[in-house]
Image: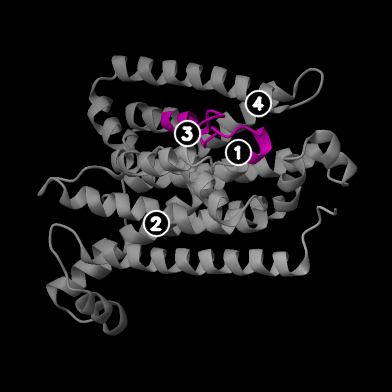
Amino acid sequence: MSAVPTSSARASLVSRRIGWTALAVLALLLAMLLSLAIGSRQIAPSAVFDALLHGGGSDAAEVVRSMRLPRTVVGVMVGAALAMAGTVMQGITRNPIADPGILGISQGASVAVVLAIAYASVHTLTGYVWFAFAGAGVAAVLVYAIAARGRGGATPVKLALAGAAINALLVSVTMAVLTTKAAALDEFRFWQVGSLSGRDAEVAAQIWPFLLVGVVLVASVARGLDALALGEDVARGLGQNVATVRIVGGLGAAVLTGVGVAAAGPIAFVGLAVPHIARAVVGTDHRWVLPMAALIGPVMLLVSDTVGRIVFPPSEVPAGVMTSLIGVPFLVALVRRKAVAA
């Protein structure tokens, strides 16, 4: 009996994937609306639409356009970037618990921000962005260079070990700077926890070109990731250049991680949980998993950010804290249902 899916089975699978994608798009639109409407001041959805479509000079319109809209846009960009980065990291390392921090990329950005605060007198979010990008890039290159040395090149195990080693080193550097430059500690900890608070249109303008480059890079290796999941020998037999897939995919993941960390700090769990949720609903084909992750990631981040604004008013719980609180139950439920694909 042939294991090849019939045309009716393939049509059913495509229909299911399209249905889930449409549902994810609706969820994202709803999450964006909630992000624009809910906060220390509640704004009716009709007033949100009026502010977006017709402008106006009311206080509500000004809050929506100048404060909440940029924050929401940055949240969409960061959520998509981290989710796609996690998806690719899990694909190229064949490690189901990989996330954007596995190669030390997030910690590289953290070190750069600490150094910028302590020694370069950088004290603005827009200033952090460029240092965080530089730190993420240097960490990614360093990890790959170490893993690529020796026989076999940059294998998944060597990448994970090199990433763990570099991550530990960078944590030590961060702690050393913070203990000798106590004045930098308070400022850094607000960035380190991960948040969308205070992100404005200038931050979005700085990161969108990098987001576009990262998306193009990871999209270009979608088929290669599918082949790599079957094993390196099978991937080569299918005509894939394994080294190229890893280099291009890793570069794309590094750029996307840089986008997320630079704009909002090292927000945890999105890059770990979202790929599993995406695979659970659309299967393991990365041509579907990557777009689904790009939709679910912003939903998780925006909902986390919105809930964090209202749980302890008038204070806010940072989105980086809320993502774990909200995301853990989803991942636990998937594990219990054995729906997580390696």
Which secondary structure lies at badge 2?
A: helix
Residue located 72% across and 65% down the image: 10
Horizontal and vertical percent position of residue 108: 49, 30
Mark with earlier residue (3, 2): 3
Q: Which residues are magenta?
A: 91-110
| Residue 86 visible from this viewpoint | yes
Can you identify the residue that label 1 sits on?
Answer: 89
Residue located 42% across and 31% down the image: 110
Q: Judge left or right: residue 71 versus residue 220.
A: left
Q: Which numbered circle lies on residue 159?
A: 4
Can you identify the residue that label 2 sits on?
Answer: 299
Horizontal and vertical percent position of residue 56: 20, 82
Q: Judge left or right: residue 18 versus residue 63.
A: right
Query: What distance separates the C-alpha of mark 4 from that of mark 1?
Result: 10 Å
Please state which of the two labelled residues, at mark 2 or mark 4, is closer to the viewer. 2
Foreground residue among 115 and 327? 327
Please state which of the two labelled residues, at mark 3 or mark 1, is closer to the viewer. 1
Disc 4 marks a residue whose amino acid type is: Leu
Residue furthest toward the left? Answer: 314
